[in-house]
């Protein structure tokens, strides 16, 4: 990397950011703090406002309320071409009438960078993204992966304080996607750029980002590291979005110092650890990751103090290679999913037999009960 | 010169070959049935011809006739040249210039003048074996008395600076170059020396605002108020303009006015006998009176009476000048170019 | 068997029409090698006549000039309309603009020219308004001169220009503008560097169509030129019809045909070379 491609690290703060389009609230009072050099993944279902958020930060979409601050500078009323924010569009948006080289130096030209310096940056970018052989090709002749690298090269050539990537890998096939994913992270970290990467794909989000923000209906529902979201989802939406989850609806029966007892009906009690966030009384949702559950033979001894136990019948077994899906049903007709590693040498289970499903009390997650459905 | 639609022009240019061929096939038939085919103008001309000449002639002589439309006689000349020896018409109504050109191109049959019983009633100059005159059209100035600040009485008045930008003049050598020849005669030249005429035209140039290609355009520009003076117009245009308002005046300017002779010629390969009988009928007293009245022109037959409206526009005292249209014909192309270059631009 | 023949049946009328037109055209061209009196072959005499006579040459240079000016003006006027129609207009506005264009297409050309006379003539709308407002004492000369013909030509070709541009503008990718904007390009540079280059195919198509229509126009200079605006079609008409010089008129038509062909080849070639660079 040449000295001319040194990036100034800058953070992003969104406060109370709202966007309305045709009377519809697309972004609804979003607060988000991104630290300098941090990579944030925006994860959420289609139409939840991810692209809209990036467009607002880039200045392509006027917010109806709220503030956008980049590197301590208020950006809300700054025209897009003065923001120096890099953006990789969902479908790259390369200029079809310009060569790879012309695409990459476009931003530098616009910023009045002298030709000599442009050449230096161009060479650096071409080398970094392994595009040197394609410098005079037109975008239409490039493969998807090559186009994506050109789009990235173009967006970083101007040394933007912030890089916004809108589903940059969605157009690629699985293999290329997996390769590019780690390459992208390496690159971003090497340059030290603050980045927001939009994706539909939870795996991709967890692999690339330092923190993941889960969005739903124009709001950020939860933000945290992959572990935070996986192990401590704050609602069923997040829990469902990041991996699978088994649920019981119940109410708190009694609570002591560190322990809660939960009535889930069927004269059955579950135990869980209490924390600052868990409600002291009332209805709750109990969530258990399927890979935390171990099916045990009826007769096997279990430490009732450390484990929760629910008896259930094995309905079906699906062998998927790396993992095996085991579907159970308990006495109240609740479906329970158990995922066992494909490598597991544990004794084979028989469909139709009854087992005790056991999981440690520590991984029993509590969240506020939601109005039915979701 | 009459209005020519572009379509007709193109059709003639593009399909002249095909038409000529079809015409040849019809030739022998025409002779057998004594159906005379007359190339002539349509519209009021066609209507007038039918009721004054063709229908009475059919009743009297038992020879039917029909009109093959032409938009202008020059156009017909072009098509006759293009379809040399392949035309099936017998008679051609035209002006002296195109007729003269056609005669020198060998496109005509000589007219047996001695067989025309009524020829003696016509001025001798308009009867020869190339053509016979059928009516004459006097030319003068039409102007709008409401907007022109003085009374126009002579051709020289067209140089008056008070007419700046108010006058329309013929386009190129339109009206078969008669305006150019007239100016030459007025300025001391003649049909073979038009330089003085162009010098005179240059004096009028500031007054010329529009150059018109057809009678109808002339009338339209005058009656819509786009121009106030028509420098050179057949009296028929005055009658047409008069329908739009009484402010329009026709002048037969001093010292003299030119008269164009419309004529008829017999085409190569025609049924000469029937054609000659038709001509003799057409130039006789009564049909002449009738057609002159209908067309707003002067009868060629000296025995025919001139209508009162025509007398009002063209007083009996008016001095006419017959131009040597035959001499002019071969120079039209050069005059046209020169007029466009020196006067129109 | 019949199914195989269907395509031939379908193209037959068009081919027949083309054949008839070509026959007419070749007969016209055939005449251009005749002497003026039409009585014999004369080689290239008519073409030499056209080339050497300043009076005739003027018709060609002046027509090319008028065609170029009117095309350029139509481009300047048409681009914003096409752009607005495709990018900014609401669906109902779009419908109205389109209806206007359609009206311009469907109305008779001669009628349109007469309409212009009513507006721009000596006692037309504009002059009456100007005199009423006291802008001028004497009416402006807006018609029956070069200006009038230019107005006529532009109004004649404008709908063609707009519809040629519509296509490319509709296909413009809005994200390219946004990408350029994010990369630091202010609106005017986006227009010059992104919008305009991507519209080049439509601009060339519209230019070709408009230029040829203007170059070949007859009715406009005839009706609006006041006899002062020398365009080629007027020369052809004047020679072939008014002066019965079909050969010279045909030669002029032949030269016009060659010029038109050259313009088509040139602009097509430019367009092809431009597009081939960046299209698959
Ligand atoms: N110009 C617009 N006018 C009205 N609504 C819009 C407009 N653009 C987007 N929307 C709506 O805003 C919502 C959010 O759109 P956005 O593109 O931000 O979604 P997204 O999260 O990026 O979805 P995806 O993952 O499918 O790309 C959608 O419901 C969409 O229909
Ligand atoms: Mg999106």
Image (tube, coloured by chain):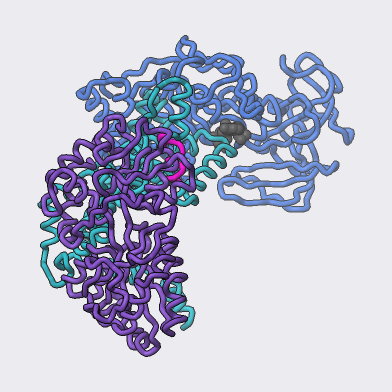
Chain colours: A blue, B purple, C cyan
Pick the residue in front: B224 or A177.
Answer: B224
Pick the residue in front: B149 or B165.
Answer: B149
B302 sits left or right of C121 in the view? left
In the displayed orientation, state which residue is furthest to the right. Answer: A267
The residue at the point 44 percent across, 24 percent down is C131
Q: Give the residues drawn in magenta, as a range.
A: C112-122
A12 sits left or right of C67 in the view? right
The residue at the point 44 percent across, 51 percent down is B240
The residue at the point 18 percent across, 56 percent down is B333
Tell me residue A116's x, y (percent): 20, 23
A251 sits left or right of C130 in the view? right
The residue at the point 28 percent across, 56 percent down is B259
Q: How many marks?
A: 0
On the question of residue A97 being in view, the answer is: no
> Within the image, what quadrant is residue A212 found in?
top right
Q: Quadrant of ligand 1?
A: top right
Tell me residue A330's x, y (percent): 81, 42
Pick the residue in front: C235 or B318.
Answer: B318
Tell me residue C65's x, y (percent): 24, 41
In the displayed orientation, state which residue is furthest to the bottom. Answer: B32
> Within the image, what quadrant is residue B310 found in?
bottom left
């Amino acid at each position: 990397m040449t000295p001319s491609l040194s990036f100034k690290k800058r953070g992003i703060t969104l406060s109370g950011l709202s966007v309305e389009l045709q009377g519809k609230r697309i972004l609804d009072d979003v607060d988000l703090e991104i630290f300098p050099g941090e990579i944030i993944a925006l994860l959420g279902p289609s139409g939840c406002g991810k692209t809209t958020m990036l467009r607002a930060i880039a200045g392509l979409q006027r917010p109806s309320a709220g503030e956008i601050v980049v590197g301590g500078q208020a950006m809300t009323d700054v025209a897009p071409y003065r923001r120096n924010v890099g953006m990789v569009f969902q479908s790259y948006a390369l200029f079809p009438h310009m060569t790879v080289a012309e695409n990459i130096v476009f931003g530098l030209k616009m910023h009045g960078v002298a030709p000599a310096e442009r050449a230096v940056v161009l060479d650096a970018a071409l080398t970094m993204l392994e595009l040197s052989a394609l410098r005079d090709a037109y975008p239409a002749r490039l493969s998807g992966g090559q186009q994506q690298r050109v789009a990235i090269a173009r967006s970083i050539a101007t040394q933007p304080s912030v890089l916004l990537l809108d589903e940059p890998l969605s157009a690629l096939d699985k293999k290329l996607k997996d390769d590019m994913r780690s390459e992208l992270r390496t690159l971003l970290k090497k340059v030290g750029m603050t980045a927001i990467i939009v994706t539909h794909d939870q795996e991709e989000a967890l692999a690339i980002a330092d923190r993941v923000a889960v969005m739903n209906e124009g709001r950020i529902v939860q933000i945290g590291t992959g572990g935070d979201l996986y192990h401590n989802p704050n609602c069923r939406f997040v829990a469902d979005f990041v991996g699978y989850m088994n649920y019981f609806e119940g109410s708190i029966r009694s609570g002591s110092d560190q322990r809660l007892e939960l009535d889930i009906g069927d004269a059955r009690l579950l135990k869980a650890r209490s924390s600052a966030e868990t409600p002291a009384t009332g209805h709750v949702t109990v969530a258990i990751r399927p890979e935390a559950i171990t099916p045990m033979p009826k007769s096997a001894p279990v430490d009732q103090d450390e484990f929760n136990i629910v008896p259930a019948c094995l309905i079906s077994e699906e062998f998927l290679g790396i993992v095996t899906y085991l579907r159970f049903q308990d006495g109240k007709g609740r479906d329970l999913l158990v995922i066992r590693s494909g490598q597991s040498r544990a004794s084979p289970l028989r469909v139709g037999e009854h087992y005790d499903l056991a999981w440690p009390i520590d991984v029993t997650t509590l969240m506020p009960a939601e109005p039915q459905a979701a | 010169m009459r209005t020519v639609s572009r379509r007709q022009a193109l059709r003639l240019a593009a399909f002249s070959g095909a038409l000529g061929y079809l015409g040849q096939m019809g030739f022998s038939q025409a002779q057998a049935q004594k159906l005379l085919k007359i190339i002539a103008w349509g519209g009021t001309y066609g209507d007038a011809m039918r009721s004054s000449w063709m229908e009475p002639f059919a009743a009297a002589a038992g020879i039917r006739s029909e009109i093959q439309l032409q938009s202008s006689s020059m156009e017909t000349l072009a098509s006759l040249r293009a379809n040399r020896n392949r035309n099936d018409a017998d008679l051609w109504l035209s002006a002296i210039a195109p007729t003269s050109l056609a005669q020198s191109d060998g496109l005509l049959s000589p007219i047996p003048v001695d067989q025309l019983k009524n020829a003696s009633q016509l001025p001798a100059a308009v009867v020869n074996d190339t053509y016979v005159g059928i009516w004459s059209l006097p030319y003068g100035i039409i102007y709008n008395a409401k907007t022109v600040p003085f009374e126009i009485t002579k051709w020289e008045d067209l140089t008056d600076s008070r007419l700046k930008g108010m006058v329309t003049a013929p386009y190129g050598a339109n009206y078969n170059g008669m305006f150019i020849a007239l100016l030459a005669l007025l300025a001391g030249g003649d049909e073979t020396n038009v330089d003085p005429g162009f010098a005179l035209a240059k004096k009028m140039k500031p007054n010329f605002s529009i150059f018109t290609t057809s009678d109808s355009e002339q009338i339209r520009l005058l009656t819509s108020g786009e121009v106030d003076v028509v420098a050179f117009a057949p009296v028929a245009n005055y009658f047409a303009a008069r329908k739009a308002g009484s402010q329009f005046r026709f002048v037969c300017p001093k010292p003299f006015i030119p008269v164009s002779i419309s004529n008829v010629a017999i085409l190569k390969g025609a049924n000469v006998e029937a054609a000659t009988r038709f001509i003799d009928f057409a130039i006789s007293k009564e049909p002449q009176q009738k057609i002159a009245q209908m067309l707003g022109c002067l009868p060629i037959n000296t025995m025919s009476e001139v209508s009162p409206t025509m007398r009002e526009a063209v007083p009996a005292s008016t001095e006419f000048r017959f131009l040597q249209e035959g001499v002019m014909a071969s120079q039209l192309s050069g005059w046209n170019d020169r007029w466009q270059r020196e006067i129109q631009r | 068997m019949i199914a195989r023949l269907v395509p031939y049946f379908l193209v037959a009328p068009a081919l027949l029409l083309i054949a008839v037109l070509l026959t007419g055209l070749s007969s016209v061209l055939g005449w251009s090698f005749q002497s003026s009196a039409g009585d014999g072959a004369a080689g290239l005499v008519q073409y030499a006549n056209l080339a050497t006579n300043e009076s005739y040459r003027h018709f060609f240079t002046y027509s090319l000039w008028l065609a170029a000016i009117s095309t350029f003006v139509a481009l300047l006027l048409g681009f914003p309309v096409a752009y607005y129609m495709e990018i900014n207009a609401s669906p109902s506005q779009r419908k109205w603009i389109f209806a206007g264009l359609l009206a311009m297409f469907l109305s008779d050309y001669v009628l349109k020219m007469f309409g212009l006379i009513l507006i721009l003539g000596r006692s037309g709308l504009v002059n009456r308004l100007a005199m009423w407002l006291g802008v001028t004492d004497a009416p402006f000369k807006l018609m029956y001169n070069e200006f009038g013909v230019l107005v006529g030509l532009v109004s004649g070709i404008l709908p063609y220009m707009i519809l040629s541009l519509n296509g490319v503008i509709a296909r413009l990718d809005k994200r390219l503008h946004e990408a350029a904007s994010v990369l630091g390009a202010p609106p005017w540079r986006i227009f010059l560097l992104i919008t305009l280059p991507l519209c080049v195919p439509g601009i060339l198509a519209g230019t070709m169509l408009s230029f040829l229509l203007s170059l070949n126009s007859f009715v406009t200079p005839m009706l609006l030129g006041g006899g002062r605006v020398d365009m080629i079609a007027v020369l052809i008409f004047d020679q072939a019809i008014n002066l019965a010089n079909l050969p010279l008129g045909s030669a002029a038509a032949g030269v016009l045909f060659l010029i038109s062909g050259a313009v088509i080849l040139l602009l097509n070639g430019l367009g092809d070379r431009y597009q081939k660079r960046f299209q698959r």
